[in-house]
Image (tube, rainbow, N blue to C red):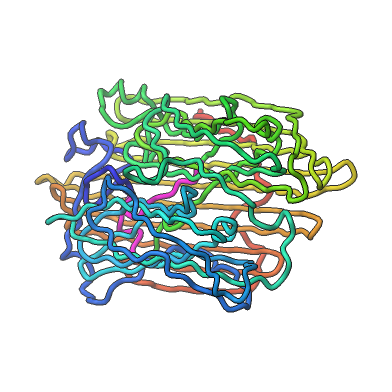
Amino acid sequence: MATSSSIFLVYFFLPLFSTATPHSTSSLYRSHLITQQESLPKSATPITFFEVTKPIKLPKTKPCSCLILEHDFGSTYRKPPILANYTPPLNCPSQKFSKIVLEWRATCKGRQFDRIFGVWISGVEIFRSCTAEPTKNGIFWTVKKDITRYSSLLMKNQIFAVYLGNIVDSTYTGVYHVEIFVHFYPAEVKLGEFDSGADLIVPISRNMHLNDGLWFEIENSTDVQSKDFKIPPNVYRAVLEVYVSFHENDEFWYGNPPNEYISSNNLTIAGNGAFREVVVSLDEMVVGVVWPFTVIYTGGVNPLFWRPISGIGSFDLPSYDIEITPLLGKILDGNSHKISFRVTDALNVWYVDANLHLWLDGKSKKTEGKLLRYSLLPLSLSVLTNFTGFDGSFITNASRSITLTGMVKSSYGTITTKSSQSLIYSNYMVMGNEGNLQIVDQIIEFNDTVYATTPSSSVHSLESFKKYLFKWYSDNVDQGSQSYTSISNLTLGLEDKRVKASKYGSSTSSVNNLQKAQGYMLVKGQLVVKGLGSTQQVYKYNDDSCCYSRSISSSNYTILYDKVSNSCSNGTWSHWPLRIGQRRSLPG
């Protein structure tokens, strides 16, 4: 569920929406179910939950560590964030850090559902995550995130803000006991200009003294949220980092059927189809989009999948970078400008905010810029439907491309930057068994490229190729006496290959992360009286200096195998580069 505005205990998706006999049309899209505590493992030992990812590559230097916040999140729903004063680690022998790591530690015992939460430094979001769902004997989880890119913020006195909206009463008994640390690792080598973090980070978020998180809430397709900002006169590079998460009626947007299907069957489920994009504008000019990864929170689909292995990205939601250096000529005038967000075909609710990373020219009081070329191909979106009654199929295809080219004059010379996004999306959905069976097969592919050059040489470049996979099968069978069985299978996949180059060198890295889960539940009324969840995951990371892989499987809270290797292998489950441009069509 991972939402601060719902009051349900455990959130199952049966299927992504369901017309099963036990439901009325007012609750077709989701079921609000309570896990029977007696069905959980008998062990009195708290269970450790975790997300599979590579360890953070750390220097050999000894870190300086700071406890930032220690708090019990009880009845915090719809209240202001918890604030903590922050002071830089002045007692550290070195103030030049090559790695800074945020560590989140949390425990919880009792009954509670998943909650979305965020951490901000003076309005700049540095971490968004979802809580694990506790058991009566307790759980524990730790998340470590590399926050080196925010180092300029951490060198000054700041205010940390943490929002975790929780409800505690006689039913929801779980209190989240949280500690937040920051570990500073002194640098071993000198950092290059384009390899270092931004000199200034401007928050594009709400005021921290308001209720709820500092993110903007986008409630429908016409809702536009924006923030005014100014930048210093000597900026030579700008990157907008966008945080995105989806909740409530759009938590499973990729399983939403077309409105035509809903109206034809007189349903009241969430719709607007299965495509979403976050559109980012600068002064009413579209400058980039985010097609988000299908993060499934720890209570989503079948919560038994995520015990103890959580879904990809659920403990550390990804952020998305948009290079807007080509647009500096439009905002270096000393005036106030506006960044806006909207979500195509959105339903309630999306949480969106951003950080504007700025690099300053220390040898110049003023830089100059000019937008040389702007190419925006409008969103191409098609939906093919073929259904009779509750059964049928839908195919949604989409594509989009944006290219920006601009120049900036600074003490580094005249640098021309070209940034582009090229994206393609395909979603194939099948409904069967009078709407009680659902199959979803979705692929998102996109290329992001940035090239910065002077008249005589290349300054830096970044090429990023990504693929997101989502496959889902669910079937509900009526068992009579107001009970039913739900059987489901899920595949999540993420591929990310990056090639970076600058005058300080070049690097290549790739991530291949594939997760599969299977399970069933016997539901009576709103009580899950029996169930089983199994998960298998293969994670592979490679770069120029190291390799890491992990193959792991769990079932019914138990780890079946866990194999870790640091040997390099070229094996992946697809091929690079991504094949931008493929589309699907209905079967003949």
Residue 392 location, x and y as percent? 37, 30
Chain part drawn in magenta: 292-307
Image point (58%, 78%), residue name:
62
Image point (40%, 42%), residue name:
246
Residue 146 location, x and y as percent? 54, 62
- Would residue 393 be counted in the magenta stretch? no
Q: Is residue 389 visible?
A: yes
Image point (57%, 27%), residue name:
283
Q: Quadrant of residue 311?
A: bottom left
Closest to the observer, 54 or 516: 54
Q: Where 192 sits versus 92, above or below?
A: above
Residue 31 location, x and y as percent? 23, 43
Q: Quadrant of residue 97?
A: bottom right
Q: Where 58 sits versus 470, above or below?
A: below
Q: Main secondary structure of the magenta part?
A: loop
Q: Is residue 489 visible?
A: no
Closest to the observer, 365 or 19: 365
Question: In this view, which residue lies farthest toward the left?
Answer: 481
Q: Where 473 sits versus 58, above or below?
A: above
Question: In this view, which residue lies farthest toward the right?
Answer: 456
Residue 488 location, x and y as percent? 33, 50
| Count of residue discs | 0
